């Protein structure tokens, strides 16, 4: 089972991200555009792991208070185009504690530095300048009250994400 821990978005943020993807398509961006149902913020990527119960136990061992999340900026990692999240101390602290709990529960995860971003287009191709794409960053805000354990399976031409469990803010 391929697993990851994520924040799922409210309608305001989803709409802002969809609008940005549409604007980029009009400007000529091509590639694998993330479907709306797959837009999320990954907190920890676990990968192939057969014990979701252990992951949920680790998640439940890290209480958190609700906090706000705000979209901020857009950019790219080579051919991956993304929307950013404003600097957020509660989010960073939660992710640090979450990853520590995963390690303590012997749950493997990708230990790359946490760089909060929302993948909008993979294998992006664009003949224009990045400045064109950076002109109209999305805006949106939400209160994070839950964190989700998600599974992903390969469907026909798209990954299918399924919520496996949820941890709620205290």
Image: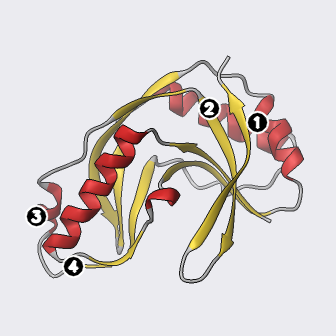
What residue appears at the point 59 percent right and 71 percent down from the top-left corner?
159
Q: Is residue 94 visible?
A: yes
Residue corresponding to mark 1: 59
Q: Is residue 9 above or below residue 37?
A: above
Which label sits in the foreground, 4 or 2? 2
What residue appears at the point 19 percent right and 63 percent down from the top-left corner?
23
Lower sequence index among marks 4 and 2: 4
Q: Residues within 10 Å of mark 4 (few under 14, many from 20)?
A: some
Whether tag 4 and tag 2 are in contact, CB under 8 A, the answer is no
Q: Residues within 10 Å of mark 3 (few under 14, many from 20)?
A: few
Q: Residues within 10 Å of mark 1 (few under 14, many from 20)?
A: many
Quadrant of residue 26 within the rendered picture: bottom left
Q: Is residue 30 above or below residue 23?
A: below
Q: Which mark is residue 146?
A: 2
- Quadrant housing the C terminus: top right
What residue appears at the point 63 percent right and 61 percent down from the top-left corner?
161
Element type where label 1 sits in the image: helix
Residue 149 placement (x, y as % from top left): 71, 47
In space, the residues marked 4 and 2 are separated at their CA atoms by: 35 Å
Residue corresponding to mark 3: 132
Residue 130 placement (x, y as % from top left): 16, 66
Whether tag 3 and tag 1 are in contact, CB under 8 A, the answer is no
In space, the residues marked 3 and 2 are separated at their CA atoms by: 35 Å
Whether tag 1 and tag 4 are in contact, CB under 8 A, the answer is no
Element type where label 3 sits in the image: helix
What residue appears at the point 69 percent right and 36 percent down from the top-left corner?
98
Q: Choose between 112 and 8: the one closer to the eye.
A: 8
- Quadrant housing the N terminus: bottom right
Q: Which mark is residue 126?
A: 4
Which label sits in the foreground, 3 or 2? 2
């Amino acid at each position: 089972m391929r697993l990851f821990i994520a924040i799922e978005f409210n309608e305001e943020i989803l709409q802002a991200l969809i609008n940005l993807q549409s604007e980029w398509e009009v400007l000529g961006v091509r590639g694998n555009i993330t479907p709306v149902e797959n837009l999320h913020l990954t907190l920890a990527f676990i990968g192939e792991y057969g014990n979701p119960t252990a992951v949920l136990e680790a998640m439940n061992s890290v209480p958190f208070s609700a906090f706000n999340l705000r979209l901020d900026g857009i950019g790219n990692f080579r051919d991956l185009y993304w929307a950013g999240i404003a600097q957020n101390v509660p989010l960073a602290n939660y992710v640090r504690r979450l990853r520590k709990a995963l390690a303590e529960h012997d749950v493997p995860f990708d230990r790359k530095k946490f760089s909060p971003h929302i993948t909008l287009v993979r294998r992006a191709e664009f003949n224009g300048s990045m400045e064109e794409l950076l002109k109209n960053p999305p805006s949106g805000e939400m209160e994070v009250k839950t964190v989700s354990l998600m599974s992903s399976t390969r469907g026909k031409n798209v990954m299918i994400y399924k919520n496996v469990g949820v941890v709620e803010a205290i």
